[in-house]
Amino acid sequence: MGVVSILTHSFTDGYNREFGRVFGGGLERYILDLCSVIRGLGHIPEVHQLSYFEAFQTRTEQIDVFGYSYDMDNVPEAFDRMAAAARGPVIYASCLWQPITYKPGSLGICHGINWDRPGLPLETKQQVAEHIQLALDGLVRIVSVDSHFQTFCRAACTYSDPRQVVLIPNAVDTSYFTPAPPTRTLEQEQEDEWLAAWKTDLASHEEDAGAVISGMKAEESQAGPSGDGAYSAKANGDGGGDTDDQEREEKGAVDLHLELSKLETAEVNGETYRVARNLRNATDWATDVLAEADAEYQDNVPIQGQVEQKTMDVRLTSPRPIRIIYPRRISMERGIIPMMLAADKLLGAFPDLEIEFAGELVEGSTVGRSFRYWHRTHPHAERINQRTYDFRDIREAYHQADIAVIPTVFSEGTSYACLEAMSCGLPVIASNVGGLNDLIQDGFNGLLVPPGEQELTAALVRLVQDRAERERLGIYARETALSYDLARWRSRWSTVLESFLAETGLKEGIRG
């Protein structure tokens, strides 16, 4: 058993000084899963990371974490200090685009290209290519989470071993991130309540009818075996009040049953309702039937009270609003600006629409302050939600959503959020950036758009208005996600780590 050291720019929340909490981003989730694989091989993971504030040491998720203060203009120097303090073989889990001096025999991970901005100066892009070449020269192997980086290395750099860059796409636990179970609609629940109330009424009618029949039998016995006395009373209208009440009650019950049997389904604006044939809508039907029932039983006060209760139960309410989820960090590269602009138009156009921003926000940052102000002053603020979810809770947010949006502008691998949403059976609208192109086939399992507000808004309007397409895309999204299952990811990483650790000769115990 030995220690394996992971060097990265972020793991616990060094942005908001919450050092004991794992930051809710894709990189951090990846490292958490990687530590689990390392433990599964019988070794002990530790993490060394940058801190925007003071240096720190903490332990979270059974992992020792060391934070290093640093000069933002000299990130390689901080990585030198991390490597010197590492107690085991080193995995560089980020910042490969920096001119780092790599510890010999180390492994690297690229979580996505972040220099894919069209407006970035050509000189800067050329420098990045040189820094990636340093990584290829200094690392025994580089694991890439998407084909984008693999293609970049082949096009802009040189290396002799084609196996040096290993493609292991990000993954999702498809046994946990499952489609939301079918839920009964409010209309269905009301219909059940109506049936239950009707059956209760029918039972009471039968009890009343039984009492009447008993009375009739008593009269029959008095009139003689032929029963002529009872018949004569009814025919002549003398002494037949109880019998008339029974007939009215039985007729009312039959009429209610007949009206209920006339129910059929109808679809209005993509939502399914239970309505009656030959009537304008379910509310009209309820009003007509209940008025008839009330007239039939106007002399019976307890039953009239039940009819009034039925009136409350049967009225239909509007279906729940359509919900769009943005399950990303609130940051520039994750497309927060195009998303806010699209939200402005959508919330104004669709009064039954809600948007949830389900991601981390760095308080005090320019983007963070801008988002807070936008939300606070928005005319539709009550339909905008912002919440930070734990890795283990985010599934519930997907289950409450109808559409997921991944509007990345630049710097994207195979997005965890995209995979999770797809695995939950949601239709996804994503920018055609980085590894998102590996996940989404436009029009088959989601929609791909160029990064920006205009195309994003148009795609959102399209899905908001087309429930059938939402459902179709969601079905194929789930099928696609199954090929990115976490079990396959663990297996492939275990193979890479076993080979890497064997090459480093990791057999000694814990040092330091």
Image: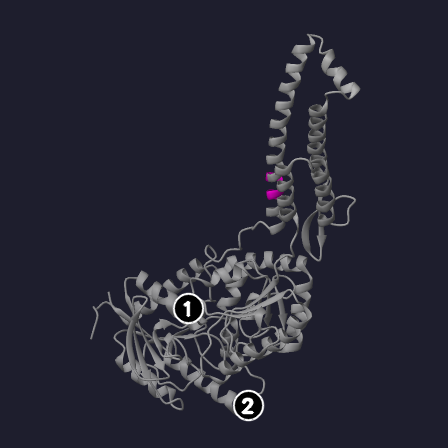
Amino acid type of the residue that numbered disc 2 sits on in the rendered structure = Leu
- Secondary element at tag 2: helix
Question: Does residue 247 sit above or below 451 in this rendering?
Answer: above
The residue tagged 1 is 29
Q: Residue 122 carries which label?
A: 2
Q: Earlier in the sequence, mark 1 or mark 2?
A: 1
Establish if 190 lies above or below 123: above
Check residue 194 for magenta coloring.
Answer: yes
Q: In this view, does 152 lie to the left or right of 269?
A: left
Mark 1 surroundings within 10 Å by alpha-carbon count, few (fewer than 14), some (14 through 19), many (20 or more): some
Q: What stretch is highlighted in magenta?
A: 192-196
The residue type indicated by label 1 comes to Arg
Q: In this view, does 71 lie above or below 464?
A: below
> Where is residue 373 shown, x and y percent of the image?
54, 81
Residue 155, can we see it?
Answer: no
Quadrant in the picture for residue 491: bottom left
Question: Which one is in front, 276 or 70?
Answer: 276
Res 294 quadrant in image: top right
How many labels, in total?
A: 2
